[in-house]
Image (spheres, coloured by chain):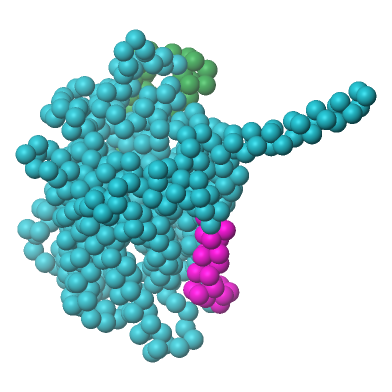
Chain colours: A green, B cyan
Amino acid sequence: MSETSRAGLLIGGAVLFVILWEIRSALGVLFRIDTNIAVYTVVTFVVILCTLVALDRGLIGFGSKEQ
Amino acid sequence: MSSAIESGEPTFLDRFPQEAKVVRSALWSSFIALTLGALFGIIQTLHRTDVLRVFSSGNYYTILTAHGVLMVVSFTIFFLVGIYTWAVVRSLDRPVEDIRYTWTWYGLMVLGTLMALVAILGGFIDAVDISADVLFTFYAPLQAHPLFYGGLAIFLIGTWLAGADWFRSWYAWKQENPGERIPLQTFMVLITMLMWYIASIGITIAVVIFLLPWSLGIIDQVNPLLTRTLFWFWGHPVVYFWLMPAYLLWYTVLPKVSGGRLFSDPLARVVFVLFLLLSTPVGIHHQYLDPGIADGFKFIALTNTMFLLLPSLLTAFTVVASMEHGARQRGGTGLLGWLRALPWANPAFTGMALAGLMFAAGGFSGMINAGLNINYLVHNTLWVPGHFHLTVGTAVALTFMAATYWLWPQLTNKPIFSRPIALAQVILWFVGMALMSNAMHVAGLIGIPRRTAEPQYDGFDFIPTFGSIAELDLQLVVGGTLLTLSAILFVSNLVLSISLPKVSGLGQPLPPALSGPDDAPKVLDNLKLWTAIALVLVILAYTLPLASIVDRGGLFGPGGTPYPTMVEFGSTLLEIYTPLTTDCISGWLQ
């Protein structure tokens, strides 16, 4: 677990954002599910933030130095 | 900052100071074009979405032409000649044969660019009778000032001479090293240039024989379909001319920055040979909706295009395998756990890895474009710019920027001003492009057209399957703004690096491949053989369509009939068979 870096988490967060955004398009184009853009955006950022905080604390730990 | 990248090795600048100067000049030319191209990019994004209109819609094609030409001709090809000069000199470990000759082709490319740019920018000034509002796809019937075509011709000659320079270096090296395999980077450069020479045949004929004389008033008219077909003869392989330097960087630099070695040198050679063979006989897939080209020829182009997926898939395998090797060398373990051990804090690595990821998405949308029937859904819609902003706009551009972070210190003996800013820059490009191209793809699916300042019609509303047009426009603007910010950060970071003091020992030698050139069949290095096969494939793919276009529309116009050839062919068949069928039925009835 020690090889995880905060830079890696940042990139992972960016990739997760893109994936979640593409899922909105896929839902809309394929299934005509019209998600509210404001709600979807807020939820997307909350999900990413929670994921990053959880991974940061779980994989890197409190007070560890940036690699 | 510099301690992180100091290796103690001499740099390219230490070893080849004259060549380093040429490479730096070519890269600066590339980055100036990127800056100007980005400026025109954000202007058109804000204009099209009606957020901010600096120019009238009448100037939209001038802006679009400047954006297209600066980005996909100047930015990409200046970077190519810089990186290829570095690659040849580095991998052959010898200076160029004559540095004056090298500066000559670079000078010609600069001159050609300036001529074309003056012609394009002349479109903003009504008092001047110079304009080139013809877009990057500069075929007829749109006509530019002769200065534009002349500039392109000189630029093209510059690239040919650059290729000759690299072939000359290789030939001299070969005389001193008989029987040795061509070093991988030089092999990639030579194959790229062979492809380029073949591809250039189309555009040379189009410009020299038709467009330039037409623009000068020497001939009255041209056959638009012929100039379109000759353009796309070159226009698709030019995509690979942009991509192949990115491939060179993915194959030879990315494994190094991952902490490992290239997985397979022979596979890399196979991939480049396949690009030489398959890049050119596919251009007609850009003309699926063009009347006057029979569907059979389009089907051949479709088939060849699908074969082009093979080298891309081989690359995905080889590059990811090399990255995994690097991660495991760095202590990574597990089925996917090794991903965490990759050097994500290194902007050179992260930029190239994200570029590769986006290229996969671009490949999928490219398959939609290349599909004969499904292309009808997206043809000339905003989907198409969405596609090529993933390929050339990200796979190529982001790789070039990321590789610059690795190469620049070796060309200047100065570290990059800020690696955190560099990391933020590549992430911003990735997110910005994802947002912008996503909006373009979705807009294209509902039929919103490309190449227009006013993408709306009176009495007609595009109906999105989700969200609204305003949301798509907002997404375009946010994406475009992030991309502009990213481009500014990139260029600023390099400019600020100038002020840093010189440091020694910033060289980054490239390790040999895990499976080296000796594992590759020698036939792979037979450049004459692959060139001959490539020419045969081009002749097979283009002779009949071109003959048909000239036969039906004339060499100099007035052009083909405005309906698909197959319709006429079908009508002819009906004319022949209907009386026969009627006779037969009459015979049976009697």
Residue B258 at what x, y percent from top left? Answer: 39, 57
Up/down of A57 relative to B185, above or below: above
Residue B121 at what x, y percent from top left? Answer: 14, 44
Let me know if residue B243 is in the magenta part. Answer: no
Q: Residue at x 74, y 30 (%)?
A: B578
Q: Residue at x 17, y 66 (%)?
A: B107
Judge left or right: residue B308 versus residue B218.
right
Let me know if residue B534 is in the magenta part. Answer: yes
Q: Nearer the viewer, residue B488 or B579?
A: B579
Up/down of B522 relative to B438, above or below: below
Q: In the picture, which quadrant includes the C terminus of chain B? A: top right
Residue B548 at what x, y percent from top left? Answer: 53, 49
Q: Is residue B79 in view from this perspective?
A: no
How many numbered marks have been drawn onto this rendered protein structure?
Answer: 0
Up/down of B552 relative to B183, above or below: above
Q: Residue at x 29, y 61 (%)?
A: B156
Q: Is residue B262 in view from this perspective?
A: yes
Q: In the picture, which quadrant includes the N terminus of chain B? A: bottom left
Residue B241 at what x, y percent from top left? Answer: 38, 57
Q: Nearer the viewer, residue B556 or B138?
A: B556
Residue B435, by quadrant, is top left
Q: Residue at x 21, y 57 (%)?
A: B151
Residue B448, by quadrant, is top left
Question: Predominant secondary structure in magenta?
Answer: helix
The part of the chain drawn in magenta is: B519-542
User: Residue pushed farthest top?
Assistant: B459
Judge left or right: residue B215 versus residue B577.
left
